[in-house]
Amino acid sequence: MSLRDVLSPFTAWKHVINDPVTIKDPFNRPGADRYRGFHQNDMDKCIGCGSCEEICQNAAIDMVPVEGQEAGPGDSGLRPMIDYGRCCWCALCVDVCMTGSLTMSNEYTWVDSDPDAFRFVPGVDGKSWDLEPKGYQREDTRRLTGTTRAPMGELAPEDRIGNFCEIVDGFTPEQAVIEADRCVECGLCVATCPAHMDIPDYIAKVRDGDFEGGLQLLYETNPFSQACGRICTHKCETTCAAMHEGDAIAIRWLKRAITDSVDKDRYFDLIQKPDVPETGQSVAVIGAGPAGLTTAFDLARKGHKVVVFEALDKPGGMMRYGIPEYRLPYDVLDHEISVIEAMGVEIRCNMRVGHEISMEQLAKAYDAVVLSIGLHQGRSTRVPGSDKAEAAIDLLRRITAGVEVPVPEQVAVIGGGNVAMDIARSMARLQKIKYGRVGVTVTALEDLDRFLADREEIEEAQEEGCVIYPARGPQEIVLDGETVMGLRTWKVQAIFDDQGRFAPKYDEADEMIHPAGMVVEAIGQMADISLLGEALTEKLEWNRGRIMIDSTGQTSEPWLWAAGDAVSGPDVIHAVADGHRVAVSVGKMLAAKREKVQ
Amino acid sequence: MRHILYRLKDRYHLGTPVFQRDDLCFVTVKRFELRAILTELRDVEGFTHLTLLTAVDWIEEQQFQLTYMVNNRVANLTLALRVMLDREDATGDTIHDLWPTAATYQRELREMFGITFPGSPRVDEEFILEGWTDLPPYRRDFDTLAYSQQTYNDRPGRVTHDPKTHMQKTLYADYPKGAK
Ligand SMILES: Cc1cc2nc3c(=O)[nH]c(=O)nc-3n(C[C@H](O)[C@H](O)[C@H](O)COP(=O)(O)OP(=O)(O)OC[C@H]3O[C@@H](n4cnc5c(N)ncnc54)[C@H](O)[C@@H]3O)c2cc1C
Ligand code: SF4
Ligand code: SF4
């Protein structure tokens, strides 16, 4: 034994005058700064996605409706209730939380004789630690779910401007699987989709590499999944849980990835007509756009005979004659429609109702008639000279039909919506092919950040050489005799008056003449209802210029339904949703009729 | 720290050292050299303190990783040695003779990961899990959720709601779902 060993017990005495390192009051001891104590949840941030419940390894969390939180876009209205009899304080829920709303205070002591007191909704059932800044919060660099979207390839502006080739590549199956892996399958987006497609379920199929199973799921809610996978307005992505702390899931591209990955011929094996008896009843559908064809698809699968009357040369409606080929190639649309025809749907093209056949004839020959005629008449600005202007949708239709359209070196487009961008970019392509250069000006009443067109449409138009003049109001189409010379505009000061009515105010001193050999109006469309005839027009009930329908799509006539742009709109997926709704309603009427006969 | 590593490198197989800080370094070593390196670190390099001994289950690679963290208090240096074990044959070499506290760590690893250390005192005795019959709970193939659901009762009155279904009921109950 050394001397040090003998002395050391005594050296401890030198600490007797130091402050004690033990805690004086062990009952009120605060937790460490990053202690994982009782939860806090920021009600303004939480979206009720349930990822916290899903990850909890102790099944300690229930999602419950709470007072003051309503379901709405991107928010289920539910909030996590935690059972602290099960919680093991691992903080996985905090780590996974999609919004960062869920945190933990450093408070961990609490005594109560009622065990149910330890089951509560943090952030709703007030607690003393609700505002405690200390405790566990997720480190910002660490995320359990990926925050960035898999990149999407597309044609560069210089490669796409001289042709009508499809711009977006689409995901490879491998990229799609990576992107699908980011989805937490909460289902918040489903409410936002007008057709309420089974988004998390088909994304799960992508993640598992089961593209054929995914395709079958898509067809349960949308027979236009190939088109929608390319051109859908994809509002679902604006409510995706992943957008709060990263990029929203590329729902639209994942849908496309499914449709692209399945061999075209396999569609006919995977999507078969159900084995149902023929009802012997028949339905006439007017207009082969997405609304009419979805109705036809559903009704044919229920055993009814469906005939679609289409005025134009080919089916597809605005998907073919409006949306340009570089966004939705024709062969994709052709294939999509052939699947619908395989259900037994008969499409008769070049049959304009009101010309080749009348409404009365249809009403007599069929058990029900569905009106899905879209909006095929362009609206005019009615400024002086506007009778010499082209309507955007007429031009787009002629370009699709392969009819030669005049292509001047300089074109002026009026309008700031997607249709304006589509015609501007289509004309730009034709100019590039003819002259090797682009000369398109786009003018609209709105400021650029208020344009109705999608951001990417505006950016891509600019990349392709279209020049945009925001806040310019059309005053006159300048003519030299019969020849269009340009467009005269004034600077817009305000578009609406104090009451919010449309009443543009201009700065007349700020005038511009946009030289142009063609002026295109792209300021909206309306339905051509001349097919109805006077008697029926008189008989039907109307609502501000539109045919009135009930919530199922039925008009005031018991044999007539209406769907799609003509009555609601504004896009393909709404038309599809309308189609389903109307098919169910028509189907009910037909069933009732069958019962009566028996 | 680098000098110590240079000295060891001459005689042992060391992986690429990872410096988390200047005074904190991780390095992978061979199992059969572990005891020799630890002994040398303790007796020659002044790493007298065993800070911790812990494990990671790399189930995808079918390996367990043991981490031996040792500390030189005087020089304020921490070195962590990593040893990879075959997951199928989860047996490590005891170091309780180098640091008696290692016996406790090893007993814990035996219980939580099922990694055994033959010769370590009381290594097969229960540590904190009494009457455990399931897979060792820190193994990644142990299903925590299934275990807790089987083992613990829910408090009465618990109900949960699926966000998607709840939104369907409250926001669009009338919509006929597709062609179903
Ligand atoms: C230029 C442009 C771009 C667009 N881009 C997009 C987009 O990117 N994404 C998106 O989701 N939506 C887009 N839309 C909107 C979308 O195309 C429509 O909302 C959708 O096509 C509406 O479907 P529908 O079936 O109601 O009508 P339509 O698609 O318009 O189909 C109506 C059909 O009825 C036919 N018809 C009309 N009258 C008669 C008659 N008397 N007899 C027989 N047949 C008749 C028409 O020829 C037409 O085929 C775009 C629209 C336009 C104009
Ligand atoms: S994960 Fe976050 S946002 Fe989602 S329900 Fe739980 S607390 Fe709310
Ligand atoms: S796409 Fe987004 S909102 Fe939809 S289920 Fe996945 S994470 Fe949730």
Image (spheres, rainbow, N blue to C red):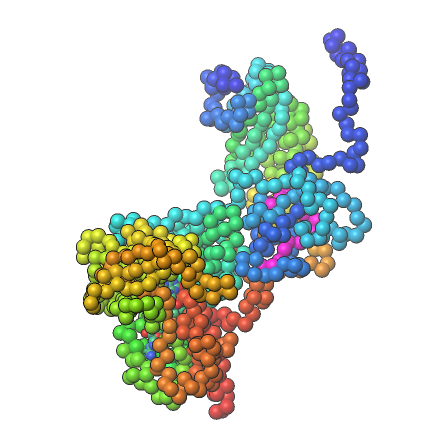
What residue occupies the far left of the structure in this picture? Answer: A435
Q: Is residue A597 magenta?
A: no
Q: Quadrant of residue A386?
A: bottom left
User: Residue visible at 56% across and 36% down?
Assistant: B56
Q: Is residue A350 left or right of residue A232?
A: left
Position of residue A84 measured from the top left corner of the image (x, y, whole percent): 70, 49
In-front residue for pair A210/A486: A486
In-front residue for pair A314/A444: A444
In-front residue for pair A121/A199: A121
Q: Is residue B23 above or below residue A285?
A: above
Position of residue A417 measured from the top left corner of the image (x, y, whole percent): 38, 61
Q: Is residue A377 left or right of residue B61?
A: left
Segment tinted magenta in the rendering: A76-94
Does residue A327 appear in the picture of this structure? no
Position of residue B125 measured from the top left corner of the image (x, y, whole percent): 69, 35
Q: Is residue A568 above or below residue A246?
A: below
User: Residue visible at 41% across and 66% down?
Assistant: A571
User: Residue visible at 52% across and 71% down?
Assistant: B175
Does residue A496 appear in the picture of this structure? yes
Q: Is residue A459 left or right of residue A9?
A: left
Q: Is residue B149 above or below residue A341?
A: above
What residue occupies the far front of the structure in this picture? Answer: A509
Q: Is residue A85 magenta?
A: yes
User: Residue visible at 56% across and 30% down?
Assistant: B67
What residue occupies the far top of the structure in this picture? Answer: A3
Q: How many marks?
A: 0
Position of residue A29 measured from the top left corner of the image (x, y, whole percent): 75, 35
